Image (cartoon, rainbow, N blue to C red):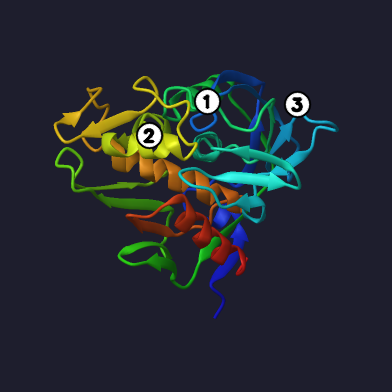
Amino acid sequence: MEAVSSQSGAEAHGVSPLQHTLAGEVTRSGIGLHSGTSTQVTIRPAAAGEGRYFVRVDLPDAPVISAQIEAVNPTMLSTELVNGDAKVRTVEHLLASLAGLGVDNARIEIDGAEVPLLDGSAHEWAMAIADVGLVSQSARVTRSILEPIWIYEGDAFVAAIPAPALRFSYGIDFELAEIGNQWHSWSPDQDSFLTEIALARTFGLAHQIDQLRSSGLIKGGSLKNALVCGDDGWLNPPLRFSNEPVRHKLLDLVGDLSLLGAIPIAHFLAYKASHRLHTQLAQKISLTL
């Protein structure tokens, strides 16, 4: 039996039968989490069927980097896409916003190698997309997962399970009491991406900061764009949700799975996973499409 089947969008549960692009342009600028350098991003409408893709406008000939699973280059603590020597990193929040608000086709022009972190969440991207609005395009094809597909490493895993509608569920477990064991489940059919997922900010552990910076990471991280938790609790409260950390992990999962294009209908379930496991699942699913 095939692991994935195709159907017209009109037959899919809770999924628009049409592709969409932006009704106008969105521009934002800011500091990259890992590089610490400032970049500007302009998201423009794209034709039906073009998908979501980045354009490095700062490089000769403005190379295009497709936001597809085949372009993933493994990195720590973020998702990076490559095309030859051209790279763009920390794409997950922006891509989650586009996918979460139903933007199938978008040209994303960027003048550097890392997407701005903004406030550490996807909220500013999502609000800007919602404000400019969408335009309907041609029919889309929606796929469904017919057999379980999973990736695991130790007790961490991410899976795609057959389901009648799209759903994402995530669990995390940290020794720090302020985080502990958290779970969250989100269905695009029932709850708004903008209010339930996009607001959740990236987070880190205080005791890991020096090690990460010595490894050349989180150069642009601060208490203004990331939640930080220590032995005595959060260094920069208040949280936007009592379980904001796990909601942010779910946000990352949506962004990484968007590299499949239209995310197949399934229940995506993850526990203690990472960008690497997310993209490995997407790669495994892509082999069945």
**Three-letter code for the amino acid on which mark 2 is drawn:** Thr
Q: Residue 15 in the image: state x and y as whole percent.
A: 52, 48
Is residue 285 placed above or below 128 in the rendered structure?
below
- Residue 52 falls left or right of residue 273: right
Which residue in the structure is indicated by mark 1? 36
Earlier in the chain: of badge 2 and badge 3, it is: 3
Is residue 111 placed above or below 261 in the rendered structure?
above
Which residue in the structure is indicated by mark 3? 58
**Residue 227 lies in quadrant:** top left
- Along the viewing direction, whichever of 209 and 142 lies nearer the viewer: 209
Crowdedness of circle 2 by 10 Å Cα count: few (<14), some, many (20+)? many
Crowdedness of circle 1 by 10 Å Cα count: few (<14), some, many (20+)? some
Which residue in the structure is indicated by mark 2? 202
Quarter of the image with the N terminus is bottom right
- Along the viewing direction, whichever of 229 and 54 lies nearer the viewer: 229
Mark 2 → mark 3, Cα distance in angstroms: 27 Å
User: Mark 1 and mark 3 in contact (Cβ < 8 Å)?
Assistant: no
